[in-house]
């Protein structure tokens, strides 16, 4: 059994006061971490104040890190700094980073290595755009992204890595992939992991779906065989919605 993992990606939203209000409201209402992993990915300057108030069950993650541990990279955030703040998770390769900040599969690979080196648990995002889906290139794109992301990453490290399948056409658009489409893509990702690392790693690795997940559609999505949780943008900004989303796996039969 893979433990469900529900994560909110706040992107570039929330000031300090708004973030603190949210944390105070949700931290007591999170499911037990033995049953569900719950994470909020916040902007870097919020990490410290959120971590001191995260409570027993919720974890705070960073939305990005640089692939070097230090250096002349103005404006970037390093793995050792995140580690020194007790940040546990880091989001890598989100489609917005790939699109607006030109992150390549090679950058994603280097960032995963930086995360591992600094004891951070990566959630690695992959997904096709609408053109690629309509031209039947979805599987090729996912295979290229997965093989690029995990190049030279040994099997022993894979047990702590989470993959988020986020079709770009479903992010922030209100268009969710149907539960069957999402399950099929997550199953395909699992089959590539099986080819690369064998059945034990493939059965153990957790794969989330992301793209317009909300309280009304999460139950069906996470009931699917290959979907182990959700990465949620817009709906994670509202504390009541996040409480419902985080607790959704407890309703699974
Ligand atoms: P969304 O974003 O839930 O607002 O579609 C998902 C994401 O970008 O992780």
Image: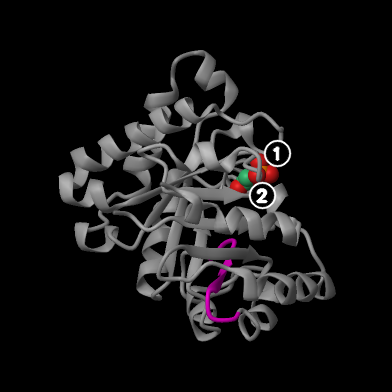
Choose top left, top right, bottom left or bottom right for residue 243.
bottom right
Determine if the magenta segment contains residue 60. Answer: yes
Choose top left, top right, bottom left or bottom right for residue 75.
bottom right
Instruction: Please state the horizontal and vertical placement of residue 246, each as a whole percent of the image.
Output: 57, 58
Residue drawn where x is 66% and y is 66% of the image: 42
Instruction: Please state the horizontal and vertical placement of residue 225, each as a whole percent of the image.
Output: 35, 38
Asked if 15 appears above or below 106 in the picture, the reply is below
Q: Nearer the viewer, residue 57 or 190?
A: 57
Q: What number of labels is visible? A: 2
Residue drawn where x is 69% and y is 58% of the image: 10
Whole-angstrom CA distance, mark 1 to mark 2, is: 7 Å
Residue 198 visible in the displayed image:
no
Residue that badge 1 annotates: 172
Q: Quadrant of the N terminus?
A: bottom left
Residue furthest top as drawn: 135
Residue drawn where x is 77% and y is 59% of the image: 13
Q: Secondary structure at mark 2?
A: loop
Task: Bin the neighbour count of mark 1 within 10 Å (Cα to Cα): few under 14, some 14-19, many 20 and up.
Answer: some
Residue that badge 2 annotates: 233
């Amino acid at each position: 059994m893979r433990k469900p993992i529900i994560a909110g990606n706040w992107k570039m939203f929330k000031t300090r006061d708004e973030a603190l209000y949210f944390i105070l409201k949700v931290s007591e209402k999170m499911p037990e971490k033995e049953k569900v992993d719950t994470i909020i990915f916040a902007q870097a300057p919020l990490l410290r104040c959120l971590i001191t108030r995260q409570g027993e069950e919720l974890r705070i993650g960073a939305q990005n890190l640089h692939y070097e541990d230090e250096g002349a990279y103005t404006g970037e955030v390093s793995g050792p700094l995140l580690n020194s703040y007790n940040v546990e998770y880091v989001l890598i390769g989100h489609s917005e980073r790939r699109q607006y900040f030109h992150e390549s599969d090679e950058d994603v690979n280097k960032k995963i290595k930086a995360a591992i080196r600094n004891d951070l648990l990566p959630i690695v995002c992959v997904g096709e755009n609408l053109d690629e889906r309509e031209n039947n290139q979805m599987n090729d794109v996912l295979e290229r992204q997965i093989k690029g992301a995990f190049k030279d990453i040994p099997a022993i490290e894979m047990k702590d890595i989470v993959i988020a399948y986020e079709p770009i056409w479903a992010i922030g658009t209100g268009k969710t992939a149907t539960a069957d489409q999402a399950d099929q893509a997550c199953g395909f990702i699992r089959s590539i992991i099986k080819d690369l690392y064998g059945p034990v790693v493939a059965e153990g690795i957790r794969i989330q779906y992301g793209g317009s997940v909300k309280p009304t559609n999460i139950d069906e999505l996470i009931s699917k065989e290959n979907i182990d949780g959700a990465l949620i943008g817009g709906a994670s900004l509202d504390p009541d919605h996040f409480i419902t989303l985080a607790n959704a796996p407890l309703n699974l039969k």
